[in-house]
Image (cartoon, rainbow, N blue to C red):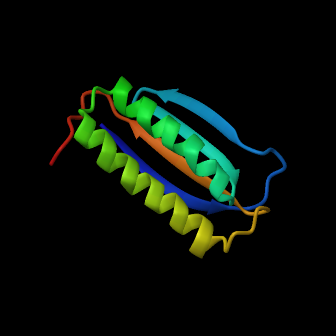
Amino acid sequence: MFSGCVTLCEPVVARHRIRFHMADTGLTVRIEFPSVFEMIDLVQAVVDQLGRTLGFDEDAQHWVGVAVRESVINAIKHGNRHDPLKRVEVDFTMTPGAAPTE
């Protein structure tokens, strides 16, 4: 199972960054990018790949993708007001042995 969160960040020079962190408690994938809608496809590609890797069925992948996509859109539009100098972070944490719940 993975959980995600979207947070607003201060400006950073790089266009986008994807980082992985492995710990005993699981794997975290962090994507950082400027507040522009063009980055939504990158986030969607990561969400889709994580869903396939974790064995989510097509329906679950779709709804997780919708939720993450909407969160990112809200962060860009309402949180950062389309300011490309402001950054968005999306974290996905996969916990070993956690089962998806309905």
In the image: residue 82, left or right of residue 1? right
Q: Is residue 26 visible?
A: no
> How many numbered discs, if any?
0
Which of these two is toward me, 94 or 63? 63
Which of these two is toward me, 42 or 18? 42
In the image: residue 41, left or right of residue 98? right
Residue 58 locus on image (x, y percent): 26, 35
Residue 24 locus on image (x, y percent): 41, 26
- Residue at the farthest right position: 13
State the residue at coordinates (43%, 39%).
93
Which of these two is toward me, 49 or 29? 49
State the residue at coordinates (51%, 46%).
91
Q: Is residue 35 visible?
A: yes
State the residue at coordinates (20%, 35%).
99
- Residue at the farthest left position: 102
Please say if 72 is above or below 64: below
Please say if 31 is above or below 27: below
Residue 57 locus on image (x, y percent): 23, 33
Residue 49 locus on image (x, y percent): 44, 30
State the residue at coordinates (55%, 31%).
21
Q: Quadrant of residue 80?
A: bottom right
Q: Quadrant of residue 70?
A: bottom left
In the image: residue 81, left or right of residue 92? right
- Which quadrant is home to the N terminus? top left
